[in-house]
Image: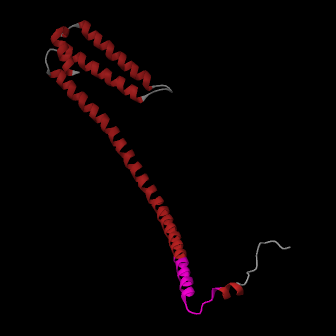
Amino acid sequence: MLILGRIWNANGAHHSTGDAVLMTVLAAGAAAAGTVSSTGWAGDPVIAGTAFATSGGLALAGVAGYSDGLSLPLLLWALATAIAYALAARYWRTDRRETTAHERHMTERHAEHAHVERVEALRAGAQIEVARTGAAYAEQLATALVTRATLPGFNPQALAEAGLPELPSITGREH
């Protein structure tokens, strides 16, 4: 805005009352828009901040366009920059605090859920080991049956004729 104000100064705004009034009205209008947008139930802080920044920029451009030398516009530019950084630093700190708090909260939640994940991994590992044990038992039983069938004197016909004893049926109801 400082550069635009100085270009405007070189093109005829130097000590022009009409140009000063124009920038005053524009800056006041932007400030009024910022005031209206920051109040009420539908106030929007982004629009209000933009309107106030526009108002300040227009006021700075008006001073830069109206004044004789470069010292006053540079002083106002430096002052506006310092104020803008001071206001922004407050929001930056707030944002950094909120970000840090969110990261801490997420770390705590990950720590809580990591325990559940470890327990579920242990449970799944135990189920896999049980399944492996059952498979190993079945493999050993099949090997034993095959080995027994190859032994001398084994008569599978006698085993089939003798039959296996029947186990009682437990169904939960009685006849």
Residue at x 55% of width, y 83% of height = 146
Residue 166 in the image: above or below residue 64: below
In the picture, residue 62 is in which quadrant? top left
Q: Is residue 148 magenta?
A: yes
Relative to 130, 63 lies left or right? left
Relative to 33, 83 lies left or right? left
Residue at x 25% of width, y 20% of height = 60
Residue at x 38% of width, y 46% of height = 99
Residue at x 33% of width, y 42% of height = 93
Q: Nearer the viewer, residue 83 or 159?
A: 159
In the picture, residue 46 is in which quadrant? top left
Residue 22 in the image: above or below residue 109: above
**Main SS of the magenta segment?**
helix
Q: Is residue 152 magenta?
A: yes
Relative to 153, 43 lies left or right? left
Q: Quadrant of the C terminus?
A: bottom right
Residue 106 in the image: above or below residue 136: above
Q: How is the image coloured?
A: secondary structure
Relative to 126, 168 lies left or right? right
Give the x, y percent position of residue 44: 44, 28
Give the residues in magenta: 136-156
Determine the residue located farthest toward the bottom in the rendered image: 153
